[in-house]
Structure formats: C-alpha cells, structure tokens
Image (cartoon, rainbow, N blue to C red):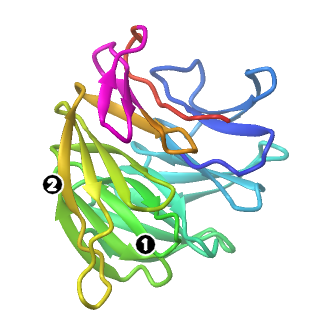
Amino acid sequence: MQGHAGANYLPLVASNRVGTEKGAARIDLQTLAAAATFTDAAIKSPFGCAVSPDGAKLYLMDRDANQVFVFATATHELLKSIAVPEDPRQAVFTPDGRSLVVSCGDAATLAVIDPASDTVTRKIKAASLDPRNMLITPDGKYLVVALVSSDLLSWYRADTLEYAGSFGVTRSPQALVVTSDAGWIYAGGALGDIGAVNAREHMANGTPEPRQENAIHVGAVYSLTSTPDGDYLYAAPTDGNGTVVEMRSWKVSKPPALKGAAQLLYVK
C-alpha cells in the first residue's frame, strides 16, 4: 500500500473479508474514523492500492476483476477502470511519477500504466512466478519485486524498468521493508522466516548483487513495517502472534496477541 506523503487521509483497502463494502476507505488520521469510501458495483476482490504523487487519484487493484479502478480522491468518483493482466496485486509509482507499475501475480507480469492517460503502455514479463509486493529503494535507483512462488527478489532500474537481476530469498516472500540507507531489505516469508538481505553488495559494473545473510524465525508473516529510524521491524502474523524485531541485534519479542492476519502501516 502506498500513501501520499503529508496527506491528512490515508486510503486503506477494505476487502470483502475485512470490510463491509468492496472498495477502499479513506481514514482520517486525526480521528481514525472512516471519512469516505471508494467503491463501485464492478469491484470484486480489491487487494492493494496506491495514491498518485499529487494526491489526486487513488488506484485500486482488483485481483478477480483483473482491473485497476481509478478514483478521484477529492470527489470519490470512479474516473476509469483499466484492464490489466491476471491477478493484479500491488502497485508502486516510479520516482519520477510518470509510471505506475502493477504486479500481476497469475500472469507473471508487471503492467506499466501511464498515469497521465491511465492506459497500459508496457507489459514486462517477470523473471519468474507470482510477482506481488514491490518497493522503490530509498535512493530511487531500483524497483524491487518479490516473486512469491519462486522465492526470489528481482531488481529493475527504476528509471527505465530494465531488468537488473534476481536473487534467492526466504520461502514465499510476502512482504518487503527496506532500511532508510538502502543497506538491508527484509522479506517476510509465509513459511515462518524474515529474510535479512544485505543490499550493499554490487557487481563490478555497479549492478546490485544482494545476498540473504540471515533468516529471522518469527512464524508466518503476512505484512511488515518498520519505524522511520530503522530501529524496529514489526511483523503481522497469520497465526495470531505479532512480532517485534530489534533491527541492530535481530532480537525477537512478542507483543500482545493479534487476531488473524493484518496489514501493517507505521504512522508517525
């Protein structure tokens, strides 16, 4: 989920498992109450969402409809629905704001949307199966894509979306967090480990050559987030047991039990 920095509201996906309406809710961060909803009769199974860099549009991925629904954040009006390859899951804007990259899991494809026209301009075949979670490294140089069914992370150059390489990580990487200095990427695995990936290693030509250096056993991970200072990593469970990881020592502790899987987001 990608929010608009500095905004007073944060769009959150409300799927038909956790919400009363198929769509997204706008949450007022002052009151933590739902201020508005973004929905349409054609929405079947929303998964991830992203907000345009100017805060004007909300993009909602629907994994069963194979559509990206585009809403105006000011009026909540549906502006357009964009057909994409099968199973759209997550989306992220490139640093220049000129492209929205959508991971389409079953199609093993990255769909590239031009937000100026809200049309698909490119389809990039993923390096392997089931691309889902994605992030842009803090230096803005690379797009990192988690390939859930292949136990891989793939790197693409953020400016051109040129493929740079793939590297093995912990089983079934469901969630990604990168440290502010881009030195470490943490991949939360569905089978019980958070993979600690050293992202500082590079080939002679400057291409990233990261390696997983540790597996932090916490139980199955559904979502990850971290504090802005990089001191703590939080993992949401699938088994009702949340986890806190002290980043410098990788020491694991357990907060009070949570009920079921959840999507985590740190709000400062």
Query: Residue 117: which disc?
Result: none
For residue 228, side relative to residue 72 (left or right): left
Query: Residue 142: which disc?
Result: 1
| Tag 1 secondary structure | strand
Above or below, comparing residue 79 to residue 115 in the picture: above
**Residue type at tag 1:** Tyr
Above or below, comparing residue 147 to residue 214 in the picture: below
The residue wearing badge 2 is: 150
Farthest residue in the right direction? 74
Q: Nearer the viewer, residue 209 or 95?
A: 209
Percent across and percent down for residue 192 are 19, 30
Category of crowding for the residue at label 1, using alpha-carbon neighbours closer than 10 angstroms: few (below 14), some (14–19), many (at least 20)? many
Tag in front: 1 or 2 = 1
The answer to whether residue 240 is magenta is: yes
Percent across and percent down for residue 181 are 48, 61
Q: Residue at x 28, y 91 (%)?
A: 205
Instruction: Specify the segment rendered in magenta.
Output: 234-256
The answer to whether residue 205 is magenta is: no
Q: In which image quadrant can residue 212 be found?
A: bottom left
**Residue type at tag 2:** Ser
